[in-house]
Amino acid sequence: MKILVCYPMKSLAKTYMPTSSELLVAESAEEFPRLARLYQPDATVVFSEMFTSPAWEWLPSVRTMLPADSPLIIVPLYRDEAIIAKVSEELGLERVYLLSAQLSQEEIRDNISIILGFMNERQKNEDQARSGQVFALMSFGASGITTFCINYPILLARQNPTKSIAVLDMNTEKPDLTRFFKLQQHQLSLFRPDLMDLQTAKRRNWRTACKQSVHLPNLYYAHAASRWRSAEVSNMIAAFRVQFDYVYVDWGYCFPESEAMQRLLYKADRNLLFVRADPFSIENAKEWLKQWREKGVHCEVLLSHQEPGQPFRIGEEIPVYGVVPHISSSRLMQSQRSRSVLIEELFPPKSYVSSLKELAKADHIEKSAVYN
């Protein structure tokens, strides 16, 4: 079968296609019409990121360039998925298959194989079954994610010495965890070519790319702040999930909602929104969680900066993952200046340590993986 693909990199386009297909690649939207007229492909796969014009302009134009009976498969960005579906339906375009924007690279290949009848050639990976569990950590800012990621994984590693834990700092705006643990020489962006293909990503030993804790050999850190593409995020999650039992991702600010952030939300096992225990933060969190719940994404709240005896009413419809108490600014500043970990200090804040231990007792934590 002769397939025409519109994708920016010819060398990588084949990783999305069935292995027995004959591939033609248009590396730009301008090159696509020429190849379509010249070769009249049996099937066509286009990535919506290739087109700068609105979908109601390029989609009907692309469909008319192709043989009427040949399938047109569209791989959309999150921002394009809904409008492409609407345009296709309203114009009555035939044989247009719109994939979900949530799919990983391997899932895209599998879906294309199903549509084009390559069922027997679908890739089957023995390690595809989940091993670790991925937690995505997000906030509106100043809600204690960095403090949590400095302390909690250490506690978790001590309590589970046979479990491997990865903590990834993906906060592009404030990579504080990178500064605290001096992760500048452990940047995952160096291995970006490996993340373009899932099989390559899984073959790499990611522990060697991370910084191993001196005192806890089962705990690893890495600087992963970069302008990732959504496919790279999918492959990173899949690879780390296989190689680690716990993977914690500190994404940081949940605005702007980039393609990569949306992919993380769909692919993580648990999404935790860190929210300060004040009325305004709680109300904003409710709206944010509601919006994502309507998109099919389940998120939970970790309520932070809770004052002793302070009541909070967040609503029965909002799932609460846990509550951590307020730590005074002077206490945190003292710890950061001395580069000490709160739970390892001689006189740690007891209420904070107790709250982390309660979280560690949760049933789900035994098989989790966390990115920071």
Image: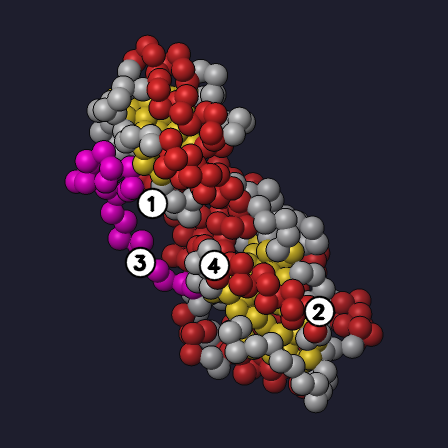
Under mark 2, the amino acid is Phe
Dot 2: element: helix
Among the two numbered marks 3 and 4 on one chain, the one whose residue lies closer to the N terminus: 3
Most extreme residue toward the left, as rendered? 120
Q: Which residues are magenta?
A: 110-134
Circle 1 sits on which residue?
Answer: 107
**Label 1 amino acid?**
Glu
Depth-wise, is mark 3 or mark 2 nearer the camera? 2
Q: What whole-number distance in Å separates the C-alpha atoms at marks 1 and 2?
A: 40 Å
Task: Name the residue that disc number 2 marks.
Answer: 280
Question: Which dot marks residue 129?
Answer: 3
Q: Quadrant of residue 1?
A: top left
Q: Looking at the image, which residue is at 61% across and 66% down?
A: 285
Estimate how packed mark 2 is, as few (under 14), some (14 to 19) or many (20 or more) residues with alpha carbons within 10 Å: few
- Residue 180's x, y, as percent? 70, 60
Q: How is the image coloured?
A: secondary structure
Q: Residue type at mark 3: give it.
A: Ala
Q: Nearer the viewer, residue 32 or 71?
A: 71
Reply above or below: 268 against 152. Answer: above
Determine whether label 2 and label 4 are within 8 Å by CB: no
Report the disc number at residue 294.
4
Residues at circles 1 and 3 in contact by the CB criterion of under 8 Å: no
Query: Residue 19's x, y, as percent?
Result: 25, 32
Question: Which amino acid does the dot numbered 4 rest on?
Answer: Glu
